[in-house]
Image: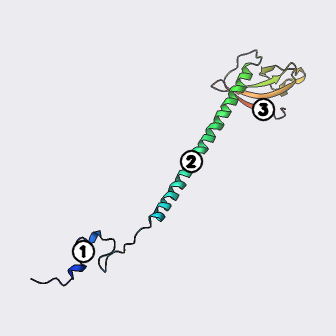
Amino acid sequence: MEKNPINPDKVAENPGLMAYAHSVGGAVIKPVDMGKAKGKAVLAMRQQTERQLNQIYQQMATLAQQAKELRQRVDVSERIYGAQMNFEPVLNETYYVYEKEDGKDVLSMVAPNEWGRAYKFSRFIAKVTMLADHTWHVEYNESQD
């Protein structure tokens, strides 16, 4: 039997489990700085969650704005339905809201420029169109107070 030329004190039983390369051609294995690795992971996690939170905040702001606009449409619609009207409004038709001298509102089919000398209101408030949900799209008079 041939004698092994390698010193038995310098041979590992499981060289693949060593924390360093066990031969000249082996891969260089460097210990990982766990603090640095964790720091990078935490930074990446914070950046990603910050992006996601910003997205959610933007969506919330959009929803809040939509809710505010819907509330305003409901308020305006209630005011219009409280106005004097001598006809039944039709969907997608344009009407005009005026304020009388006594402060009451009137819904009319007649535009401000169509009254001529018969104009009997203290002011023109808005041009309105009835939407399918029976709320109103409102275009306010720009000279409104």
Any part of residue 93 in sight: no
Sequence-wise, the earlier of marks 2 and 1 is: 1
Nearer-the-camera pick, 100 or 94? 100
Q: Which residue is mark 3?
A: 140
Residue sitting at x 81%, y 28%: 125
**Residue 44 coordinates in the image, percent (x, y):** 51, 58
Q: Going 78% across and 32% down the picture, which residue do you hit?
A: 140
Which label sits in the foreground, 2 or 1?
1
Task: Give the Cα distance between marks 2 and 1.
Answer: 52 Å
Q: Which circle's residue, 2 or 3, is located before the other in the chain?
A: 2
Residue annotated with mark 2: 53
Residue under label 1: 12
**What is the quadrant of residue 24 in the picture?**
bottom left
Residue 7 picture quarter: bottom left
Amino acid carrying mark 2 in the image: Leu
Is disc 1 placed on a helix, strand or loop?
loop
